[in-house]
Amino acid sequence: MYRIVRKKELGPNLVELEVEAPLVAVKAQPGQFVIVRLHEKGERIPLTLADWDAQRGTITLVAQMLGKTTYQLGLEYGEGDCLQDVVGPLGNPSEIELYGTVVVVGGGVGIAPIYPIARALREAGNTVIGVVGARTKALLFWLDRMEQICHELHVTTDDGSHGRKGVVTEPLRAILAARKVARVWAIGPAIMMKFATQTAQEFAVPIIVSLNTIMVDGTGMCGGCRVEVQGQARFACVDGPEFDGTQVHWDLLLARLGAYKEEERCALEQYLAVKEGRR
Amino acid sequence: MIRPTQVPMREQEPWARIRNFEEVPFGYEPEEAVAEAERCLQCKKAPCIPGCPVQIDIPKFIREIREGDFRAAIRTIKEMNNLPAICGRVCPQETQCQAVCTLGKKHEPVAIGRLERFVADWEYEHGVELPPVGQPTGFRVAVVGSGPAGLTCAADLRRLGHAVTMFEALHEPGGVLMYGIPEFRLPKRIVLAEIENLLRMGVELRLNVVVGRTLTVDELFALGYHAVFVGSGAGLPKFLGIPGENLIGVYSANEFLTRTNLMRAYLFPEYDTPIKVGKTVAVVGGGNVAMDAARTALRLGAEKVMVLYRRTEAEMPARREEIHHAKEEGVEFHFLVNPLRFLDSGGRVSAVECIRMELGEPDESGRRRPVPLPGSNFVLPVETVIVAIGNDPHPLIPRTTPGLAVTKHGTLVADAEGRTTREGVFAGGDIVTGAATVISAMGAGKRAAQAIHEYLLSRYRQKAATFLKRR
């Protein structure tokens, strides 16, 4: 069992969890993910590692409450509670090298997994420019952490409640237009990564994205996470989760993310109705 | 006078069983088992024994059934086979022990599998005897994977007195027995009971450890294991590589079966994992996994399930019994048909375009190669497709283990006893052979356990001697 040692609400429907998982904490590298199962009847969901502490034997996860599983995690699981299963670290680590100047873009809950990548890039000697954004101020988090790591940090909100009003691609475009950037990392909602990719492509700058597909086992066994990259079927869990953004078939990815939309809605509604009834 | 035909095994009626996930056959009653056992000729040179991948003394256990000594019969089986309740259900006896049965020359062969199943189930009802565990040797062995190969290897090593830890990547042990083979063919309580017995023998089980990621083989040695057995299974599902294969509604059989069996998606929303099955389902492939997928689709509510196979029924690798069950349940078989592409409607698969095939010259597998008939294209409307054309070996362990050679197919290089190219590392099951049967994986696990035992005693002769002296 994997005990939650710390839980923090980062914003509305946004939780940060520090979980005991010593074997994962020792091995974790930026860009990797874990598969989590809450309880005996739970589904297996992938969550990208936001941080880890080998000494404490813990990993940090950030989850946005979207479907039944993440709602249940947010509403019912607190400090001292245990997650039934945590397995990892899975997927290939980010390719961290000295590139020169790099831009890391984190959108929404994607700010969490971009943070350890930014940190590793900084440690490798890169000049790290951060761009983070969310719909509104309340959904922004870890700005202090990102400020510490990045040489420069740009913040956007869709509604202008914090930082610049607009979306992350706007500062990204301005940065790419103004200076020579060796590489971009973008993590966030698929639609944001798609547009970040288009922006990077305009300037012919390589862009790496992290694909958070639907997964079951997360170890390559089921193929449910397949995406089309460079015209080839690839498994996000074992061939990724990071890919060259310019080679990703975005529309297919977006469609596949919605494969169980109806079931997800039904499960969430039923769950919330039961919760409501109990209250 | 010998009864020419096998004592039939009662089973759920097809119309009833396609609405549930309960086991199809009910198994023999004691009188039925004794009657079937009486058909055995008790051959002196019993051909069935070498016909069995783990060489069970078949005439002996059948004789014991005939004498009504079911306890003795299960003991005889368990001398060679730790998992008889599983093998009695999923072994392809008709191509192994029963294929060479002397009685089979004139009549139906003895129903060895049904008898094995009978005594294994009898033991569950009347109390399981654990095999004796050997005196502790001081050696520790890591077993990677808790499927048929790993379970067998772990049990045999434990019997020899070694300390054994099984590492499993998933959240439940059992490998393909849990995620792959459906409940109606192999009830999960049987698998879990077998694993429980292993734990009672003192085998340690660590779930959620992906060897190659969470821990490497080298790290297992660094943790103090003296040998490692790799039984990590078949790995990555193969796809056809045709247009439209990534549309929503196209599943690999692994995903379809894992969602249903391991994640219990058939109980959604009580269980959180969903699965989606349309009214019309096409299953591509002709093996046991294809049969499992087709029959599972029916139970999940499909109205029409078609198996598309590019050769004829004679070439199908699936067990006859599985094909028979699938037909009884109303699965349609379309032979000499190959999918060319999947068509979509709003991002979901809506049809499969196929071409008719004919059989040409034999290929390297000895089966006649299917060749397409130009211009014979046709379109079948479908809402769900399940691709069941096999698996490629998982590259994770070879890639993260220096010194471990792989074949051109990506399987681990290992000799008949499971010795790999790396000292102290043994392997068996699908990771060595490619997709095969439960019993062949068990046979490999068994031989590897013996080889590991011999390796430990010779490699660490001094350590073994001092340890034994100290005792």
Image (cartoon, grey):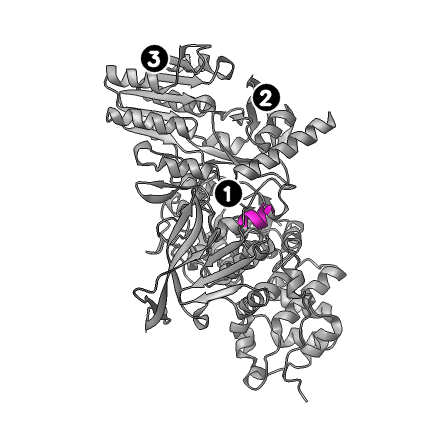
- Secondary structure beneath disc 1? loop
How far apart are the alpha carbons under marks 1 and 3? 38 Å
Q: Are marks 2 and 1 on the same chain?
A: yes
Q: Are marks 2 and 3 on the same chain?
A: yes
- Mark 1: few/some/many CA within 10 Å (<14, 14-19, 20+): many
Query: Residue B15: image x %, image y %?
Result: 65, 63
How far apart are the alpha carbons under marks 2 and 3? 29 Å
Name the residue that disc number 2 marks: A6
Residue range corresponding to the magenta coloring: B258-265
On the rendered structure, is B242 left or right of B14? left
Name the residue that disc number 3 marks: A151
* Amino acid on which disc 1 is placed: Asp
Query: Residue A162: image x %, image y %?
Result: 45, 10
Query: Residue B457: image x %, image y %?
Result: 50, 55
Q: Nearer the viewer, mark 2 or mark 1?
A: 1
- Give the camera-side residue of B241 and B338: B338
How far apart are the alpha carbons under marks 2 and 1? 26 Å
Q: Chain of mark 2?
A: A
Dot placed on the residue nearer the N-terminal end, 1 or 3: 3
- Give the camera-side residue of B3 and B25: B25
Answer whether residue B259 is magenta in the image: yes
- Give the camera-side residue of B212 and B101: B101
